[in-house]
């Protein structure tokens, strides 16, 4: 008996990736994007120079297309590789989306844009944490005293009406 294969998977396999898992991962991401996320104008293509299958589609009808790179969750991604991908594919300055598929069929999407920022200095991080901590303390104090503040505001409004 001849096994039936989905036409999209057949075309992905025909691209000829050196790693056969590439096509099955791309197919899983394709199905997730088309059936679950309802991406518009979803297309797939092969970049021979990078030996990767990539997908393009629009999250909304009026948006510019995104580029999706299907990857196995066990695959290693380096900044150098990301730069090569961004230069080789039609990212149109919108960056790209890495779609990591795990063995249990879970797919996690990460948006990547061009350029790296230097991390904040330890002093800046400490200052930001301090400001955030003060903010949380202030909110907790306001929450704790909300009844007193509400009663005070209500009594002031009653006095003004007289």
Image (cartoon, helix red, strand yellow):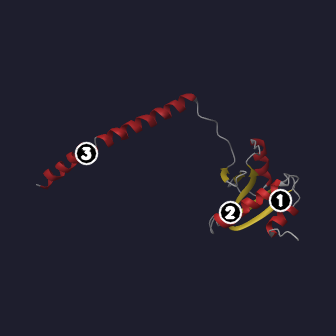
Residue underneath mark 3: 147
Q: Would residue 73 be visible to someone looking at this image?
A: yes
Q: Is residue 39 at least partly visible in the picture?
A: no
Q: Position of residue 120 (x, y in %)?
A: 59, 34
Q: Which residue in the structure is indicated by mark 1?
A: 46
> Residue drawn at (69%, 44%), measured in percent from left and top?
115
Q: Residue at x 88, y 53 (%)?
A: 18
Which comes sooner in the sequence, label 3 or label 2? 2
Q: Between disc 2 and disc 1, whose residue precedes? A: 2
Looking at the image, residue 146 lies above or below residue 20: above
Mark 2 vs mark 1, CA separation in Å: 17 Å
Residue 33 is marked as 2
Is the N terminus in the top left, top right, bottom left or bottom right quadrant?
A: bottom right
Q: Secondary structure at mark 1?
A: strand
Closer to the eye: label 2 or 1? 2
**In the picture, residue 107 is in which quadrant?**
bottom right
Mark 3 vs mark 1: in front: 3
Callout 2 crowding tier (Cα within 10 Å): few <14, some 14–19, many ≥20:
many
Residue 63 position in % (x across, y down): 63, 64
How far across and how far down the image is residue 19, in percent?
A: 86, 52
Q: Which circle's residue, 3 or 1, is located before the other in the chain?
A: 1
Residue at image x 49%, y 34%?
Answer: 129
Contact (CB < 8 A) between labels 2 and 1? no
Task: Measure the C-alpha gap from mark 3 to mark 1.
Answer: 63 Å
Label 1: how many Cα within 10 Å (few below 14, some 14–19, many 20+):
some
Give the quadrant of the C terminus: bottom left
Foreground of the two, 95 or 1: 1
Q: Secondary structure at mark 2?
A: helix
């Amino acid at each position: 008996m001849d096994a039936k294969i989905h036409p999209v998977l057949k075309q992905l396999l025909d691209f000829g990736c050196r790693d056969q898992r590439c096509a099955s991962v791309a197919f899983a991401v394709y199905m997730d994007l088309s059936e679950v996320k309802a991406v518009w104008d979803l297309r797939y293509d092969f970049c021979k120079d990078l030996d990767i299958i990539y997908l393009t589609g629009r999250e909304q009808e009026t948006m510019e297309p995104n580029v999706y790179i299907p990857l196995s969750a066990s695959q290693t991604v380096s900044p150098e590789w990301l730069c090569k991908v961004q230069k080789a594919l039609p990212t149109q300055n919108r960056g790209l989306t890495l779609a990591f598929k795990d063995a249990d069929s879970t797919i996690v999407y990460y948006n990547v844009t061009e350029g790296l920022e230097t991390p904040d200095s330890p002093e800046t991080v400490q200052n930001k944490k301090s400001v955030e901590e003060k903010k949380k303390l202030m909110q907790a104090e306001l929450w704790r005293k909300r009844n007193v503040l509400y009663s005070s505001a209500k009594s002031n409004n009653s006095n003004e009406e007289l």
